[in-house]
Image (tube, rainbow, N blue to C red):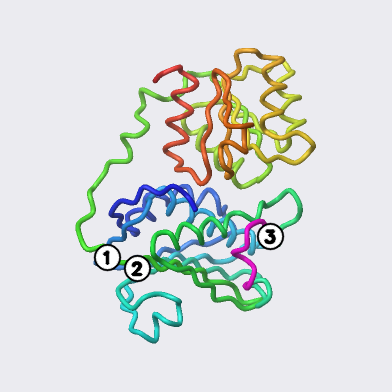
């Protein structure tokens, strides 16, 4: 279970706002198409959680198409009668579906049965935590919806999120106001990212580079410590808590503070804060951001920590 802050949300508008991030994440070898629905019903969900769920589904689809392929994101209004609702383990009623389809390797029935289990992953050690789909499942179920998988080995996979229709209007928000030019990085400001998942490390790096930061990357704790022991300028360390290589994120941070006592540190974790940083204790200049997080929230937090603004 996660802490949710649901608001009336237009899923098509949310998808359109993520187009650039999705394109960067998928890369040039994958053709992407979005099939929107005119008059799509609003849903009552935690929008940042839905953004992260969609991004996770796109990353999984990309990994299933190592040689390239086609990804389709499609929304639809669904009226589920008693039979259709029973098939999806949902109450009868009106729903919005958000489906991500790929032309990748597909999944065998035995894999489909386990994909929502925490820590289950088909990826090699160090390339996946097995938490992505379980967190998506938990978020959607908490939101009153359901997740369904349609897959065939060698033919591809479709992952569908069904979310209950919200009766009411959706407030229009200007997301561009989250990161005005006045908060862009000053030339030379440098962020070190220590993260073992390549997709997340590259995505965060590209987003921060677009904000004007110089970005350094390390895939393991020891590699991150080596960078911090060098003469490189580092204004902020962003580190995942669960890392391979013998050092977790807190140990990396502690080692960094030995070399750089005033180093600012942002922990990123999908686990409870108490477990992540030791009884929830954060030293001065340390903050924590829980996965899944909204990219705009990450950028705002980085600006605040680097520049010392409150």
Distance in Å between CA atoms under marks 1 and 3: 34 Å
Q: From which residue to which does the magenta span run?
A: 112-121
Left or right, 307 with respect to 65, comes to left
Quadrant location of residue 10? Answer: bottom left
Tags 2 and 1 in contact by the CB under 8 Å rule? yes
* Nearer-the-camera pick, 226 or 50: 50
- What is the residue that sits farthest to the front in this orientation? 279
At horizontal 58% and vertical 36% (from top left) the residue drawn is: 274
**Mark 3 vs mark 2, CA separation in Å:** 28 Å
Measuring from the top left, give residue 190's x and y in whole percent: 57, 22
Measure how far apart labels 2 and 1 are at the Cα level: 7 Å
Q: In x, y percent, where is residue 161?
A: 44, 66
* Residue for badge 2: 96
Residue at image point 49% right, 66% down: 100
Considering every residue shown, the one lying at the far right of the view is 246
Tag 3 residue: 121
**Badge 3 vs badge 2, beta-carbon distance below 8 Å:** no
Q: Position of residue 18 (x, y in %)?
A: 42, 50
Q: Secondary structure at mark 3?
A: loop
Horizontal placement of 179 versus 156: left or right? left
Residue position for label 1: 41
């Amino acid at each position: 279970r996660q802490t949710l802050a649901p608001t009336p949300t237009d899923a098509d508008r949310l998808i359109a706002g993520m187009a650039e991030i999705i394109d960067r994440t998928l890369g040039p070898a994958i053709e992407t198409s979005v099939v929107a629905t005119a008059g799509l019903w609003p849903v009552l969900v935690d929008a940042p959680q839905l953004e992260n769920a969609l991004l996770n589904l796109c990353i999984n689809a990309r990994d299933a198409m190592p040689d390239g392929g086609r990804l389709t994101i499609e929304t639809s209004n669904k009226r589920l009668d008693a039979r259709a609702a029973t098939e999806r383990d949902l109450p009868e009623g009106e729903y919005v579906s958000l489906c991500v389809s790929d032309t990748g390797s597909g999944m065998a029935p035995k894999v489909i049965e386990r994909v929502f289990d925490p820590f289950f992953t088909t990826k090699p050690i160090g390339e996946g935590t097995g938490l992505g789909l379980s967190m998506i499942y938990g978020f959607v179920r908490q939101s009153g919806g359901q997740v369904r998988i349609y897959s065939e080995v060698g033919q591809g996979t479709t992952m569908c999120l069904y979310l209950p229709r919200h009766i009411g209007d959706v407030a229009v928000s200007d997301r561009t106001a989250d990161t005005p030019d006045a908060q862009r990085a000053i030339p030379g400001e440098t962020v070190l990212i220590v993260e073992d998942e390549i997709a997340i490390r590259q995505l965060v790096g590209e987003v921060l580079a677009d904000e004007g930061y110089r970005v350094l990357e390390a895939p393991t704790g020891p590699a991150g410590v080596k960078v911090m022991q060098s003469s490189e300028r580092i204004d902020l360390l962003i580190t995942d808590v669960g890392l391979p290589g013998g050092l977790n994120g807190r140990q990396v941070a502690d080692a960094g503070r030995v070399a750089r006592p005033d180093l600012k540190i942002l922990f990123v974790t999908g686990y409870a804060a108490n477990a992540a940083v030791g009884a929830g204790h954060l030293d001065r200049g340390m903050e924590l951001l829980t996965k899944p997080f909204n990219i705009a929230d990450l950028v705002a937090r980085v600006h605040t920590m680097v520049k010392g603004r409150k």
